[in-house]
Image (spheres, helix red, strand yellow):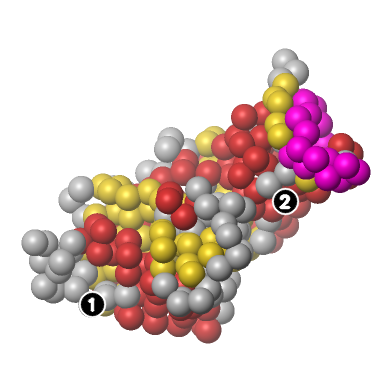
Amino acid sequence: MIFGQDIGIDLGTATILVYVKGKGIVLREPSVVAIDKNTNEVLAVGQEARKMLGRTPGNIIALRPLKDGVISDYTITEKMLKYFITKVCGKFVFSPRIMICVPSRVTEVEKKAVIDAANHAGARKVSLIEEPIAAAIGAGIDIGKPYGSMIVDIGGGTTDIAVISLGGSVRSMSLKMAGDKFDDAIIKYVKRNKNVIIGERTAEDIKINIGCMYPKTVLERMNVKGRDLTTGLPVEIELTSEEIFDALKPCADVIVEGVHTILEETPPELSADISERGIYITGGGGLVYGLDKLLEERTGIPVMIAEDAQSCVAIGTGKALNHIELLEEGNAMKIKKF
């Protein structure tokens, strides 16, 4: 039995990561819930529920209760959080303190929805931290220093771009262009150019295996299965990395444009820091091949993908548990490098 644990949660649109103080990341599962429509009963959560996406009978639906980085289905999010908290903590006597990261620029209503969901799921106290701040901490950046650092955190639902100095965001932007939109772009491209419909999971596999946002030197190929729109029958087609580059190019352009906009708004002294220190990419969406090369080419600034980019936000959220009071008082500049 564990008493009053401190937990950091990266409440992602595609994946939930849970960080326990003193243990590190203890859980990484898809943000998917399967429910019975007739009884409203939760049948599966996480990896088990993800296997059901697109494969359920009429009375069962597998859904993602978070969309574009915020809660779209409050009740299901609460049930999902309760499931994961219990899985991590077991039967607790003292409820855990929880820190949850949220996209920059979320509204007060969206923040309240996250806090209420966590409270009802069993939290003793809930604190929030902005994703770019958490990502910077997780990437090992000393956020308390008086120099500028640029973070581009690409998750499943949002891309958060921020310039951080003295523990806070000097300039920030949250784009609803991230991993899920990359998958959508691949689905639409295959439908338009191959006359074949593929599912979300297939699109994600394509993105991971041959996806690119900068031309690859060696052409890669992948066979995928879908449904022919003309005949309605199952069909197998071959896709190349060049085709997926064409599919993802508009998505990459939106992110590059966002980075340009933030750089244009950044004070000159901090801009000089960024050109010297570089841009850090975090988040699973940032692992698509070539995004770092594209950003470097378009901005002329060195671009680095953070070590363990997928876990940076969760690690930063967990480490920030040691400084809940400072963050709540707005004294994040006092947080030293971890």
Q: Where is residue 79 in the image (x, y as percent from the top left)?
A: 39, 72
What percent of the width, then of the height, locates residue 325? 26, 72
Residue at screen point 24% across, 70% down: 97
Any magenta on residue 229? Answer: yes
In this view of the protein, can residue 70 be seen by the observer?
A: no
Report if residue 117 is visible in the image: yes
Give me the disc on residue 44: none
Taking the spot 32% from the left edge, 65% from the top edge, the residue there is 83
What residue does disc 1 label? 124
Q: Name the residue under label 2.
A: 184
Discs 2/1, front: 2
Task: Let me know if residue 282 is in the magenta part.
Answer: no
Q: In the picture shown, does residue 301 fall above or below 69?
A: above
Secondary structure at numbered mark 1: loop
What's the magenta region?
A: 226-250
State whether residue 136 is above or below residue 37: above
